[in-house]
Amino acid sequence: MSSPNRSTHIRLTSHPEPSTATSRHPIRWGAQDPKERGPVIGSVTNPADRNVIGAHGGSYSLYRALAISSRALNPVARPDLHNTHPTAEIGPHPQWFEPGKIVSLDPWGHLVGQVYGDEIAGGVDIRPTIAITKARLNMPEILSAMGLKRLKADGGVLHESGDISVTKVAVDPVWYLPGIAARFGCSEGELRRTLFEQTGGMFPELVTRPDMSVFLPPIGNITVYIIGDVAGLSDPKRRIACRVHDECNGSDVFGSDICTCRPYLVHGIEECVREAQSGGVGVIAYNRKEGRALGEVTKFLVYNARKRQEGGDSATTYFERTECVAGVQDARFQQLMPDVLHWLGIRRIDRLMSMSNMKYDAITGSGIEVVERVPIPAELVPPDAQVELEAKKAAGYYTPDGAPDASDLSQVKGRDLERF
Amino acid sequence: MSSPNRSTHIRLTSHPEPSTATSRHPIRWGAQDPKERGPVIGSVTNPADRNVIGAHGGSYSLYRALAISSRALNPVARPDLHNTHPTAEIGPHPQWFEPGKIVSLDPWGHLVGQVYGDEIAGGVDIRPTIAITKARLNMPEILSAMGLKRLKADGGVLHESGDISVTKVAVDPVWYLPGIAARFGCSEGELRRTLFEQTGGMFPELVTRPDMSVFLPPIGNITVYIIGDVAGLSDPKRRIACRVHDECNGSDVFGSDICTCRPYLVHGIEECVREAQSGGVGVIAYNRKEGRALGEVTKFLVYNARKRQEGGDSATTYFERTECVAGVQDARFQQLMPDVLHWLGIRRIDRLMSMSNMKYDAITGSGIEVVERVPIPAELVPPDAQVELEAKKAAGYYTPDGAPDASDLSQVKGRDLERF
């Protein structure tokens, strides 16, 4: 296998030049014609073609580097995209071209093989940033719901085996920096500099390449599960049920009982199945934002501080403890979250399975109508998760029963560390 | 709130200087005395103190930058670590100081408040890279196992409610670059350069700061779930059951039936409970390496290529399809995986719930004895997952029944895309 590095010259950063890719392969974000918009070229097999900052695959670009270091991967290998094209059509939708509507993903990301086929055939290494496939899901809670007659197999959406038929979509982040800055209310220059400095100096091109407006950040992807007819997502006559879920590995996978994450997610899936069975469409958008996008180490430190504080774990001081450890109560910033809903063509959500005011405000503020908000059924809330849920209700979470007052809140206590 | 950026001067990278932190706060990796080893300082509140490349929180440093851009987080905020200390003692173990044994995490990462308390009190912003807390897990499959009398509540490890009491640990990656290079069989210079170039130019300090040997890569963390007595992990008289699991969101959370990930994980947890109930200890190590560390977009592209190939999804061509799309069959590289087991003090695993030859070879090659390998019970393998499992058996996965031959393999076919 050839050497992983092409020459002995190392270029620490780059600067705008008349001959660079941004002039040969310019990106005109939001342009209707994909040829005019131009492809996102983040591969490193030919550095001269690159027109974005960062690399494909988010964090996984580091594993690619390890694969090359260990001589298992040829550094100039290009993907054979034969047969990888989407299993369902999504777009183009008018939202793709509405200014500022989509700034954190590439709406053409799943279609590169079709719309940039000529360029790829001509030797440009253009890679999909979105992939669409089909799957069958089998979850024990759905089988229980069938046993309890809450759900019934129909042979199409839900099978006798408990399998749910879905279309699933993986979406890698592609950030249009001027649009991201606008969402966060700062200048593009400030955003670029803060991203560079707060990551300990990641990607100097953020500051040296103002001509490159697109960034592939090394963060996790979004996964979307669509239950029912994908084409129905942009049809105003079809009802849509939706859960927007932020990753919580401890609950989503392991069933940790300190929060409502998996129970609410599963409830969302059940509602999506029901909606699809009655002719609508269900959508689950799963975002990799572990521990309110503060990461799991911070999350576990906060758990300890909550459980050990004087008076024990309490709804009254729930948010304070996160802020003490992390400097901020929440870093999820739902500002970018609606992009994927616009990409799907959604204009109205009939049932939103979320109580988060931040998610609701972000979705409705971006122009999507929300008809009904569906709280988590009380019987699904694990015992130790009451602290979080009541604290959130007091802080503005949606609840049809009214928010708890200070005295209610002070009654809500979590399990002590000694009783785990 | 103060401006996110301290001055108008932007420094694109840094270079070794006599006055830099690497001389004031040198890291002597592997030293026995934590004071001599020195703290890992990756925070950006005081750039002059930094002695590593990268930033804390892995990928989540980008969300911290967004929090600062939107003025929700003070860029110089420091964590209040009061009450966040570990709920269980881990180490120091002799493995922490055996040369080359641990190179991808900081063994002192959970103890910074204790061993570097003086430095923190003196104003150095030292942050934990490991956090240890307690939790209760409630999983429907464990409740089923109780219903079927495979498991029985004991009121300590497993409760009548189905709750499992665990100690859980979040471990952020901390890479000692000379040690990482040794694991991958390349020079440190080659590793640094490949990491820099293959990520599209992330962290020029990888090449400009040979004096800084430690890197906080923006990849996902490890979570460890310990069932039973943590102190038993380093006691040669206690039995240990262990599952080393690589993230597969589609199966782990959503129960996708194309692989065995969640079923094997849950089986591992059940075995861990049983081991803990009979006086041993159970360990689940969960690694964020989605889609063989190729990411979910690549994974879904490969699913489509597998399902659409001539003759349909087949065990014979299982690995080929990944290699066509990704250039490599697998980028998980189990070389670094055993570090966390050494950190826990483990010298012997009595029951390893994994059939992976790569995991087995990495664990035993690093000096941990494996007494028994426990395959996934046949009844837990979902129908569409046979293709993957048989292909892996033929490629060297452990199986007590013997590997399938070419003719067996060609019989194993997956579901067609039309039948999802």
Image: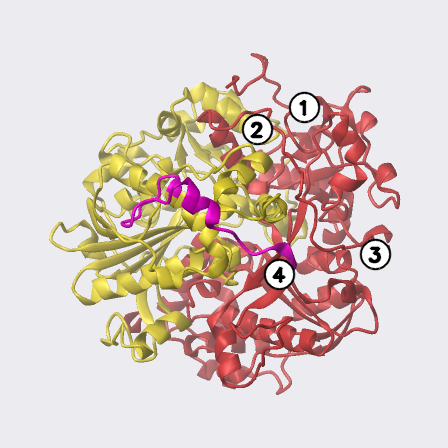
Chain colours: A red, B yellow
Range of residues picked out in magenta:
B394-420
C-alpha separation, residue under disc 4 versus residue under disc 2: 39 Å
Which of the two residues, A33 or A410, is positioned nearer the viewer here? A33
Which of the two residues, B256 or B214, is positioned nearer the viewer here? B256
Q: Same chain for the residues at labels 3 and 4, yes or no?
A: no
Q: Same chain for the residues at labels 1 and 2, yes or no?
A: no
* Left or right: A178, with B165 as reference point: right
Badge 3 local density, few (<14 within 10 Å), some, or many (20+)? many
Which residue is tagged 1?
A47
- At mark 1, the secondary structure is helix
Q: Residue at x 82, y 68 (%)?
A: A235
Q: What is the chain letter for disc 3?
A: A
Residue A316 seen in render = no
Q: Which residue is drawn at 57% across and 28% down?
A: B198
Residue A226 in the image, given as x and y percentages of width and height: 66, 63
Which residue is tagged 3?
A95
Which residue is tagged 2?
B198
Dot 4 or dot 2: first in sequence order is: 2
Q: Are marks 2 and 3 in contact (CB under 8 Å)?
A: no
Q: Same chain for the residues at labels 2 and 3, yes or no?
A: no
Q: In which quarter of the image is residue B109?
A: top left
Give residue B74's mark. none
Measured along the vertical axis of the image, is residue A200 above or below residue A366?
Answer: above
